Image (cartoon, grey):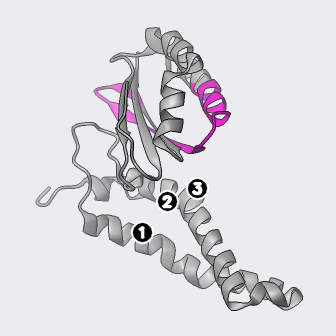
Amino acid sequence: MNIELSEGVVTLLVRHRVKQGGDEAYENWLRRTIAMARTYPGHLGIDVMRGQSQGLAQFTSVLRFATTEQLQHWLDSEDRRKLVEEAQPLLADGDQTEVNADREFWFTPTDAAAPTPPRWKQACVTFLVILPLSFLVPMLFKPLFGWVPWLGGYVQGNVLITASIVLLVVYVFMPRVTRLFGKWLQSQPGS
């Protein structure tokens, strides 16, 4: 798979429906695959969403890489080729991948046929995550700024607080909150 070059973070969506009885073997394979992907340059993280599709377990993995070239390196790697080959007997539909340069990876539906949630719903969920952090994180840093006054300077303090909020949003809260609000995000008007 060749992907077009783009600036900034790029995501790889991998959807796998697992044949009946293959869940445990797939989970073991998935752990090894995640560990391998983390060793590749530019890997920024992975989120795995578990669900059901047509009576089978479905796993949707969202891998983030810093650049398109780094993602392409992972896609073309012998490691990934061997891992996908090993998983093929477990998969009902083969290896379903999609590259996405959009920043909306938190809101990518686990069902390929489902539309991306409306932007207003994405904004609501993002607001619910960021608002409490914007109150809480500065309060948590206040004692540190008292002990190390130069860290509490306008620029240093804002950089530290903003970086903390961004990391918490990306790696801790958004993956969990989008799973929590998954049904609402995917519900259509009148349903």
Element under disc 1:
helix
Q: Which mark is residue 174?
A: 2
| Range of magenta residues | 30-58
Bin the neighbour count of mark 2 within 10 Å (Cα to Cα): few under 14, some 14-19, many 20 and up.
Answer: some
Q: Is residue 43 above or below residue 124?
A: above
User: In the rendered image, which residue does mark 1 sit on?
Assistant: 126
Left or right of 115 on screen, residue 42: right
Answer with mark 3 or mark 1, whichever residue precedes in sequence. Answer: 1
Q: Is residue 50 magenta?
A: yes
Answer yes or no: do the residues labelled 1 and 2 have beta carbons within 8 Å? yes
Q: Give me the residue at 39% from left, 67% from top.
A: 125
> Quadrant of the rendered structure where residue 52 is?
top left
Which x, y percent locates residue 10? 44, 46
Answer with mark 1 or mark 2, whichever residue precedes in sequence. Answer: 1
User: In the rendered image, which residue does mark 3 sit on?
Assistant: 171
Residue type at tag 2: Met
Left or right of 124 on screen, residue 153: right
Bin the neighbour count of mark 1 within 10 Å (Cα to Cα): few under 14, some 14-19, many 20 and up.
Answer: some
Q: Which mark is residue 187?
A: none
Q: Residue furthest top?
A: 89
Q: Give me the residue at 49% from left, 10% from top.
A: 85
Q: Is residue 27 above or below residue 112?
A: above
Which x, y percent locates residue 128? 44, 73
Residue type at tag 1: Thr
